Amino acid sequence: HTAHFQHVSGKRSFSIDYKNNCFLKDGKPFQYISGSIHYSRIPQYYWKDRLLKMYMTGLNAVQVYVPWNFHEAVQGVHNFTGDRDLEHFLDLANQTGLLVILRPGPYICAEWEMGGLPAWLLQKPNIILRSADTDYLQAVNNWLAVLLSKMKRWLYVNGGNIITVQVENEYGSYFSCDYNYMRHLQTLFRFFLGEDAVLFTTDGNTDREMTCGTLQGLYATVDFGTDTNITEAFNRQRRFEPRGPLVNSEFYTGWLDHWGDQHAVVDTQKVSRVLGEMLTMGANVNMYMFEGGTNFGYWNGKVTFRSVVTSYDYDAPLTEAGDPTEKLLAIRDVISQFREVPSGPLPPATPKFAYGFVTMKKVGNISDLLSTLSPLGPVKSKYPLTFEEMKQYYGYMLYRTMLPRDLSEPTPLISPLNGVHDRAYVSINGVFQGLLERDTALVMKVTGQQGDTVDILVENMGRVNFGSKINDYKGLLSNLILGKDILTDWKIYPLDIDGAIASGWPHSNSQKSVRSPQRNPPPGPTFYMATLQTNSLTWDTFLKLNEWTKGQVWINGVNLGRYWPARGPQQTLYIPGPLLSATQPNNITVLELEGAPAHLRVLFMDRPQLNITAGKS
């Protein structure tokens, strides 16, 4: 047994034992039972709480995605502080006693905006993402040089807790099947992480995916959920890896929701039964997700044309707010049959509080606030420019032009090439006319006089994160046609709504706010504000916007994400307690895009509502 001398001399090692079909940790057989947790979807304040709950469930590892666009929103500017402090997250996992399976991409899917790829890549109009395209690889090289250099000291063999590192993500599901790309990544990962790092790939349980996603020298693993024949799935892994450990890198404990879906639920009994069967076979399993968390801000992804909801609760063992569920207890029972689960009680759910009703007041229509929201003013262009051409990648932009002639009767406004990405809210002389929506509403009728101002607010609903359409440009991508005229001579306003709100607007100049109570709030994109006094509590809470239609909410300058109760199923937005102030008034800002209810009330509740699907609005 000469293989054991390393361990005796105290050198840490982590490797694959092809003879005995397992991992070796310090020379001893090792099986991981892991759960996925995304630091980008959970406030830093709660990282330790969630990791401890995972450890107390009996997990010995966590699996983590690194979203490139979360750390390099602006090309060449890297942010690893606060909620983006990846090394702090790794350190907390280490202190908790959890090993790490790192998934640095560069593409991650994850139902995350553009699958983690930065939208600034799209400034090269013909770029082929996830391929050996020179422009793409140049950006990837620069990013991985920064990221993997930081990660090297966190490898288990170097004294850290990272045991394995995934290259790319389910590459076999992508159309390009470009082996040169995967080879290039393999070379980069080896260069920055060294020869001893255990590198692997993950692919869906089909022949095509395994064929295009695997590469000699990267250990091939598979992913599947509760409705799969386990033996068949692991046999497929065996065809690509005849020897070595069985690995399910994504065992689905739940599933995601799109707006307009029924809320996804996966049965607890099924999850625990299949988990038990895999562990009995000696397989290494990562549960995706263990806690889903939240797509705060604009970070949600999109599959084809349906956007992922703000909550990434996933029906996971820990809820969106990090609370243990029956599913977690069932999983802990299964794990206890295979390894010793830490004794002692699970950390309790974080306390929640129903702060009650707050009545919002109108700040103004978005068209009247452009001096605040677009301080640099508009760019003039004969034809519309995209978000990417304007170098504003997320959120909203306003396109303004004039009616070229009198429209005595309702005239069709058409997006003939389906160029509205993703929703356009149309007003004429400040009066809301209706909306155009990608793939579903390409025509509407308008009336007005020659020279009337046409304002079109365009919302980016999150870029596609899966499949061949991930080069998802936003804004007005092609001309709009009014009757038989092409609309031209645009003023295009980039909107820094988040910047304005983060610096205190509209509360900082609230004496200017509209106080005259209107019987019915006007339809169309409008800002509302209020404050919430929490009477010295800062407990988590859930915001319900009953009878509001669709929009975005900020609390104390932080973008909580999108609400769309009219479409559902999500009805409440999760508000982490640490965002609230115990002593100061908490600033609430709402951008309602279509129409607010006459009562203008919002409700802070002590529990979520994620499963009410309204009729399609």
Image (cartoon, helix red, strand yellow):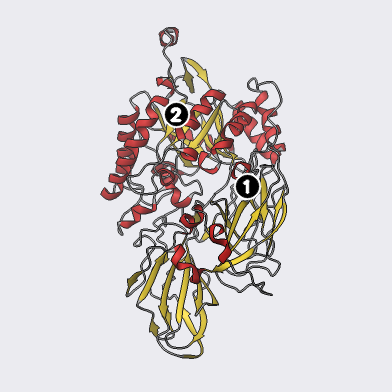
Q: Residue at x 42, y 32 (%)?
A: 165
- What crowding class fits label 2: few (fewer than 14 Cα within 10 Å), some (14-19), or many (20 or more)? many
User: Could you say which quadrant of the image residue 581 lies in?
Assistant: top right
Quadrant holding the N terminus: top left
Q: Please, what is the three-letter code of the amino acid marked with disc 2?
A: Thr
Residue 527 visible at all:
no
Q: Local crowd at mark 1 within 10 Å, few (<14), some, or many (≥20)?
A: few
At horizontal 50% and vertical 80% (from top left) the residue drawn is: 429
- The residue lying at 63 percent from left, 67 percent from top is 616
The residue identified by callout 1 is 584
Of the 4 image quadrants, the one containing the C terminus is bottom right
Q: Quadrant of residue 291?
A: top right
Label of residue 164 in the image: 2
Mark before the other along the chain sequence, 2 or 1: 2
Say which of marks 2 and 1 sits in front: 1
Residue type pointed to by label 1: Gln
Q: Position of residue 544 (x, y in %)?
A: 68, 56
